[in-house]
Image (cartoon, rainbow, N blue to C red):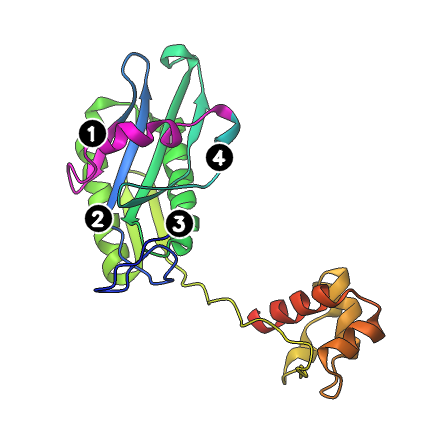
Amino acid sequence: MATINQTNQFYEGCGREGPIRCILLSEFHAVAGSKISCQVPENYIAKEVFDSIRFFIIPKPQLQRCTLTVNALGHKVIGYPVKIDHTRYPRNAFYFNLCFVCDSWARSVQYEAVVKKLSEYLLMMEEETSFLSNPDNNTRIQNLLSCILRDLNEKQVATIVEGETTIYLKIVRLKPDPPPVQDHQVPLICKGFENISLEAWDLTTQQVIPFINGINHVARIAAEADVENQLVKSCIQNLVYY
């Protein structure tokens, strides 16, 4: 259950955005297991905190290449775990997870695509030059993550050149969901909408759109289009969003 801080109203689910507090890189060591190999700022995530969530940071194979969010002990951690299979690694595999860390109350969905894109860059760099697994690169990795953390928090964009790779990242602010649609409401098509091909929408929306004329209310649209009422509401809510 979400808890509410009555002083500042920052609580899980409040919908407020917060900064990226930390970027950490975790790896699976053949002997030591899951560990933090780099984080900026240093020691932001204590070892005790990491140990309590490490099985979610380097998860089982079926969760590799999926965006995962863990909310625990005052931190929200967004990661994208990756496994690279190759005979040059101990146990013939290299596991890593590049994670953004936010406050537990902060809205974080806008960071998910950035975490995935940055992880894909690091995957490419590891496959080409062993950028992550080579201990000689520790300082370069630390500097890279520091620049990304600073630029994303200050400018919401980061363009970083690392070796032969140029990393482009941008935080795209997502619009909040439209309010719920009611039976009595009358949707109206806006100017310019007619320029969008009907085939661009899903089949249910294609069935609903011809009955949106500025006269029919939602319940009548559902009846005339022969579409279940709740589906019509979802379609209209989706049209409002986009």
User: Which residue matches tag 2?
Assistant: 147
Would you say residue 200 sits in the magenta stretch? no
How far, Cα to Cα, is label 3 from label 4?
29 Å
Give whichever of discs 1 and 4 has the lower sequence position: 1
Mark 4 and mark 2: Cα distance apart in space: 24 Å
Let me know if residue 58 is in the magenta part.
yes
What segment carries the magenta color?
36-61
Q: Amino acid at mark 3?
A: Met
Between marks 1 and 4 in the image, the one whose residue lies nearer the viewer? 1
Q: Which comes before the other along the chain, label 3 or label 1? A: 3
Considering depth in this image, is 137 or 172 the residue closer to the camera? 172
Question: Identity of the amino acid at label 1?
Answer: Lys
Tell me where residue 169 appears, x and y as whole percent: 36, 52
Instruction: Find numbered disc 2 in the image and state the secondary structure of the residue it sits on.
Output: helix
Name the residue that disc number 4 marks: 65
Give the residue drawn at x 79%, y 79%.
220
**Along the line of sight, the residue nearer the viewer: 93 or 15:** 15
Q: Which residue is mark 3?
A: 1
**Helix, strand or loop under label 4:** loop
Which is nearer the N-term, disc 2 or disc 3? 3
Q: Amino acid at mark 2?
A: Cys
Q: Nearer the viewer, mark 3 or mark 1?
A: 3
Residue 131 visible: no
Residue 148 visible here: yes
Q: Tag 1's secondary structure?
A: helix
Query: Can you name the residue that lies furthest to the bottom here?
Result: 215
Per the model, the C-alpha gap separating discs 2 and 1 is: 24 Å
Residue 186 lies, in percent from the top left, at 68, 84
Does the CB distance between marks 4 and 2 fall below 8 Å? no
Rounded to the nearest whole Å, what is the CA distance between mark 3 and mark 1?
26 Å
Question: Which label sits on residue 79?
Answer: none
Disc 1 marks which residue?
Answer: 47
